Amino acid sequence: MKRHIPNIITSCNLLSGSLAVGAAFQQSFSLALGFIVLGAVFDFFDGFTARLLGVSSPIGKELDSLADVVTFGLAPATLVVQMLAITMPFAESPLATLIPYGGFLIVAFSAYRLAKYNLDTRQTHSFIGLPTPANALFWASLGVSLFDSDAVTVLPREVIFWLIAAGTLLSCWILISEIPMFALKFKSFGWRENVVRYSFLIASLAILIFCFLTNVGVLGIAAIILLYVFVSLLSSQKSTHPAY
């Protein structure tokens, strides 16, 4: 029986992702974010449980990738499609109804990212390219901040449209890029060997506190993802060009 427990948890991740997609189609950004976060929790605990119980199976690995494609690929892509549809400035164009579907590019690039991760032995203790859960959380929290909250100053819709369109292409690229991204995995707890991780965690806490005090809602999650990318880029440049 215990060998089925991780697969049951993974199936809960898949269910959460499916519910997030349904919420996204209804333009319920807050609910979609909640289901994506819930899926991320299940995604963490399926692997944790498998290691704890000492069980693993080929079907479990395949199921995990399938669930992640839905929760961290299809769900955020659907949110992006809805955001593009809401803000699209070419409403009178005959092809206007097709333009927002470009957001589904995120599904294809997320699937490629996950397949690459499964085969890439370099990603045992760190990542190459942006992890799909981080990308999903970015888009979901941004959607909530822009469309389900009055706390953020709303830019002109045309500006939001072009920012989302450009962000979609950028996130597709960074998902499959060769940019090293650090993971919050600690081999030890000393400051010197974990300075990047500790600095990131401290800065993230400061961002969350600031967002709470200024009432800008979950925008802090999107800001933390951007910080994660920036810190990863900065640390990768330092490792590529060490000081002499």
Image (cartoon, rainbow, N blue to C red):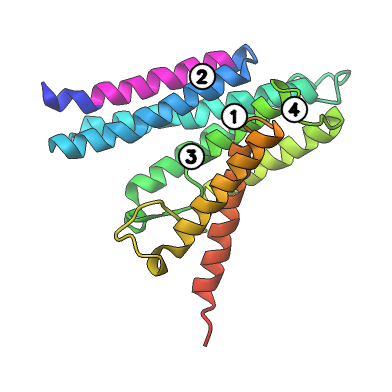
Residues 84 and 150: in front is: 150
Q: Mark 1 and mark 2 in contact (Cβ < 8 Å)?
A: yes
Q: Is residue 49 left or right of residue 225?
A: left
Q: Which residue is mark 2?
A: 20
214 shown above or below 70: below
Name which residue lies at 10% across and 21% down.
1
In percent of the image, x 43 and y 19: which residue is there? 16
Q: Are marks 3 and 4 in contact (CB under 8 Å)?
A: no
| Callout 1 crowding tier (Cα within 10 Å): few <14, some 14–19, many ≥20 | many
**Mark earlier in primary sequence (4, 1):** 1
Determine which of the numbered discs, if any, sits on residue 140 in the image: 1
Q: Which label was assigned to residue 151?
A: 4
Asked if residue 11 lies in the magenta stretch, the reply is yes
Q: Is residue 6 magenta?
A: no
Question: Between disc 4 and disc 2, whose residue precedes?
Answer: 2
**Which is more N-terminal, label 3 or label 2?**
2
Magenta segment: 7-23
Mark 4 → mark 1, Cα distance in angstroms: 16 Å
Looking at the image, residue 24 sits to the left or right of residue 73; the answer is: right
Residue mark closest to the camera, 4 vs 2 = 4
State the residue position of label 3.
132
